Image (cartoon, grey):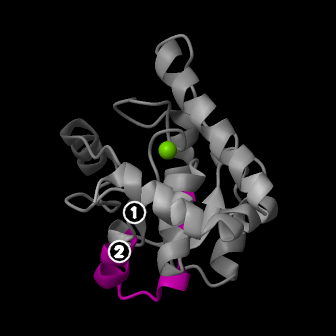
Amino acid sequence: MSQLLYVFLAGHRQRRALGQLQKQAAQGSTADVDLAALKQRGVRALVFDFDGVLGPHGAPQPVALGQKALTEAQQIFGAGHVYILSNKPTPERRSWFRENFPHIIFIDGVRKKPYPDGLLKIAALGNYQTNQIALLDDRLLTGGLACLDCGARFVYISRPCADYSAHPAKELFFATLRSIEALLARFAA
Ligand SMILES: [Mg+2]
């Protein structure tokens, strides 16, 4: 099944849950997430989406804010318990992580979010229950749905990183997409 069709069907099926996710979500950027509080609430594995969460769309490597969050995450969750789950796991990004954060596990070779495959792979790799995994993601209909599907925790990044000067059309496209899904989720709740 195509990813888009899956998004549509699963999004429709989970529309109330998505609305709840959005309603309960803390509003903010990656820098605003209290990682220590997640750990205290039983999260053992922290998973970062890339685009919008660690850097602007298409960036080859995380920006300073993202790198700071990654460093903090490693300190709090420990080596081997921080993961990257991006729908664009490019070789360039993978090698950046290998060089700069060798203990952060870069997931690829799985079906894209909203399929829960990447989160299930993480659960198997680290021997976690899915509710011990938290995903930081700026998209309700990809990351949010993937979490709902497998019972992982979703941390909504409602104010994502963007770089309008580098990629105005792309950023505008994703900003529009996020507004539409946020609007849909609000009406469904
Ligand atoms: Mg994203």
Ligand 1 under 8 Å from disc 2 Cβ: no
Dot 2 alpha-carbon crowd within 10 angstroms: few under 14, some 14 to 19, many 20 or more: many
Q: Label 1 near label 2: C-beta < 8 Å?
A: yes
Image point (33%, 56%), residue name: 112
Q: What amino acid is found at the position of numbered circle 2 in the picture?
A: Ile
Image point (37%, 35%), residue name: 61
Image point (79%, 65%), residue name: 24
Which element type, helix, strand or loop, lies under badge 2? helix
Q: In the image, which disc is placed on residue 83? A: 1
Q: Quadrant of the N terminus?
A: bottom left
Q: Is residue 184 above or below residue 125?
A: above
Q: How many marks?
A: 2
Q: Is residue 166 above or below residue 119?
A: above
Name the image quarter holding residue 65: top right
Dot 1 alpha-carbon crowd within 10 angstroms: few under 14, some 14 to 19, many 20 or more: many
Mark nearer the N terminus (2 vs 1): 1
Which residue range is magenta in the image? Answer: 119-137
Residue 59: x percent and y percent?
40, 29
In the rendered image, which residue does mark 2 sit on? 122
Residue 124: x percent and y percent?
31, 83
Image point (69%, 56%), residue name: 33
Relative to the observer, which residue lies in front, 62 or 150?
150
Q: What amino acid is found at the position of numbered circle 1 in the picture?
A: Tyr
Q: Is residue 163 above or below residue 134?
A: above
Q: Nearer the viewer, mark 2 or mark 1?
A: 2
Is residue 147 shown left or right of residue 58? right
Name the image quarter holding residue 165: top right
Q: In the image, which disc is placed on residue 16? A: none
Relative to the observer, which residue lies in front, 8 or 49?
8
Residue 21: x percent and y percent?
71, 65
